Amino acid sequence: MKTESITASGQMTFLRRRYPLRLRLAKGIVGAVPLADIVLLVILFLIMGSWIVLKPGVFLQLPEADFVAGVHAGANVVTLSREGLVFFNDERTTLDQLRQQLVRAVHGQAEPVLVIEADRRITHEQLIRVYDMAKAAGYDEVLLATRVAASPGASP
């Protein structure tokens, strides 16, 4: 803060107020401890979101196919595991409840599509049972999910 004063001799002098160093907002380089805290927090967030953390799920071994067909996002998905677990849109259900869920999900969709993700060890009878439920519920298309077959020259 500058202030002016005129002395008796007519000269102007400037008075400056000096603030002590301890009251300044920034002292210069950021301290080592806060910087270390920030680095450790960033490392923690990276570890928590990385591949080290296992995501819950059911292991499926989809059958291989040479053809590749796609489905638009938003299709309903039924998952059948080899242990007998049934999931509809990532929520666990039973085959008896699946029929009502398929009927509820088909309403309001212009072209309803259902994708069946079934383990390769699922019997043909179980697949046909789910397929019949889907057709009875009103699905226009029912697709079986597969994985792309490895090319002959690629290693497994």
Image: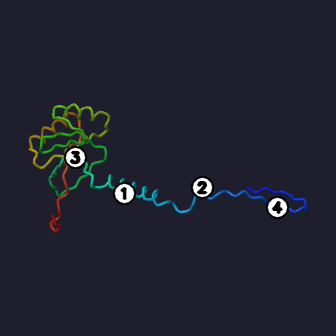
Which residue position holds label 4? Answer: 13
Q: Which mark is residue 57?
A: 3
User: How far from the left and from the top, in percent, is residue 110?
Assistant: 31, 38
* 10 Å crowding of disc 1: few (<14), some (14-19), many (20+): few
Disc 2 to disc 4, C-alpha distance: 28 Å
Disc 4 to disc 3, C-alpha distance: 79 Å
Q: Nearer the viewer, mark 2 or mark 4?
A: 4
User: How far from the left and from the top, in percent, is residue 28?
Assistant: 56, 62
Query: Which of pointers 3 and 2 lies earlier in the amino acid sequence?
Result: 2
Residue drawn at x 16%, y 32% as measured from the top left? 96
Which residue position holds label 1? Answer: 43
Query: Which of pointers 4 and 3 lies earlier in the amino acid sequence?
Result: 4
Query: Which of pointers 2 and 1 lies earlier in the amino acid sequence?
Result: 2
Front residue (pair 9, 2): 9
Residue drawn at x 19%, y 54% as measured from the top left? 147
Disc 3 to disc 2, C-alpha distance: 52 Å
The amino acid type of the residue labelled 4 equals: Thr
Query: Which of pointers 1 and 3 lies earlier in the amino acid sequence?
Result: 1
Front residue (pair 39, 69): 39
Disc 1 to disc 4, C-alpha distance: 56 Å
Q: Nearer the viewer, mark 2 or mark 1?
A: 2
Which residue position holds label 2? Answer: 25
Disc 1 to disc 3, C-alpha distance: 26 Å
Mark 4 secondary-structure assignment: strand
Mark 3 secondary-structure assignment: loop
The amino acid type of the residue labelled 2 equals: Leu
- Quadrant location of the C terminus? bottom left
Front residue (pair 7, 57): 7
